[in-house]
Amino acid sequence: ALVQNIGKQIESFLGKKEDEYNGYKVEVNQSCEDKRIKVSLLEVLLDDENLLLSMNIDTSNFDESKLKKGLFLTNNYYLPEATVYIDGNLDPNKDYDVKVVFDEVGVQKYGLIPRVINDQFEFIKGNWEFNFTVNGKKIMGETKVFDINKEISIDDEDFKALINIEQLRVSPISVKLSYTSKIGEGYSFENRDIKIELLDQNGESINVGGSGRYNEDETYMENIFEGNLEDNQKLKSIKILPYQYYMEKNSDNPKYHHKIDYEDKAIIIDLD
């Protein structure tokens, strides 16, 4: 499960009106304290296999003298990814007993002089555990699933690639695209890459994050695009636009970075 630590109402994190996700989310309001750090779980939302958590961290009683010394301006406490236990496979018609465990709290220590003294990270080991029940029936019932299974072939003179668009999932809160990409013989993802951009019906980019897994010789990649959308309920269609990204040379100068859109290869999914 993907865990997001929001720290306030889930709606405010996603740019929605207060209480707009009532009926989807569950109020938990549990607190757990260890190492004189109190972590509170406020709200939970189960969205198509992703678990969103609204949480707070109270470090007012924590003794910062236990942290490693250094020239730091301030400390920022945060929760790394949790371990999530859900009983059974996802079924929209049942309740789930869920346990979420954090075994450390992260501390980002900001350097006193930017670009001279680097930020450092430290982790406080402990145990912060939460148990609750959640049901995804309503949101899963409103999630649209499109099994696309369509190949896109890129056959440029200087670049060959093959993309297989597998599945698009759109819930009232998020979007997820699964696809694979393979580049031709003699090429490498290191300096050239074939990517996907998601656009709404107005041509505006949909802000999603990606993750992927390469094969051993880095010519094949399994990809997942997913993100929480502020205006997801206003989406009427999604354009899946493949593009090539490459660098002439290893440089931060944007003039050496290039993007080639393949508009004629785009796939448009009508959500109505």
Image (tube, rainbow, N blue to C red):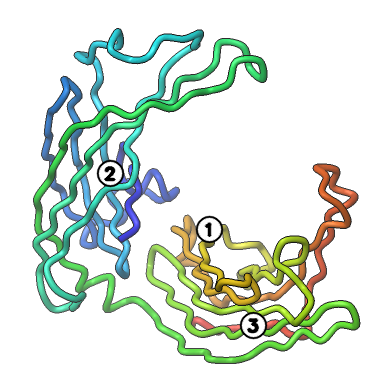
Is disc 1 placed on a helix, strand or loop? strand
Q: Residues within 10 Å of mark 3 (few under 14, many from 20)?
A: many
In the rendered view, does 19 fall on the left or right side of 113?
A: left
Could you tell which of marks 1 and 2 lies nearer the N-terminus? Answer: 2
Amino acid tagged 1: Gly
Could you tell which of marks 3 and 2 lies nearer the N-terminus? Answer: 2
Amino acid tagged 2: Ser
The residue sitting at the front extreme is 216
Q: Residues within 10 Å of mark 1 (few under 14, many from 20)?
A: few
Question: Nearer the viewer's eye, disc 1 or disc 3?
Answer: 3
Residue in view at x 85 percent, y 43 percent: 253
Q: Are marks 1 and 2 in contact (CB under 8 Å)?
A: no
Mark 1 to mark 3 CA distance (whole Å): 18 Å
Q: Residues within 10 Å of mark 2 (few under 14, many from 20)?
A: many
Residue in view at x 15 percent, y 48 percent: 27
Q: Vertical placement of 222 versus 19: above or below?
A: below
Question: Nearer the viewer's eye, disc 3 or disc 2?
Answer: 3
Residue 43, x across and y down, in percent:
21, 47
> Which residue is label 3 attached to?
163
Q: Vertical placement of 237 versus 82: above or below?
A: below
> Which residue is label 1 attached to?
209
Residue 234, x across and y down, in percent:
50, 67
Q: State the mark number for residue 54.
A: 2
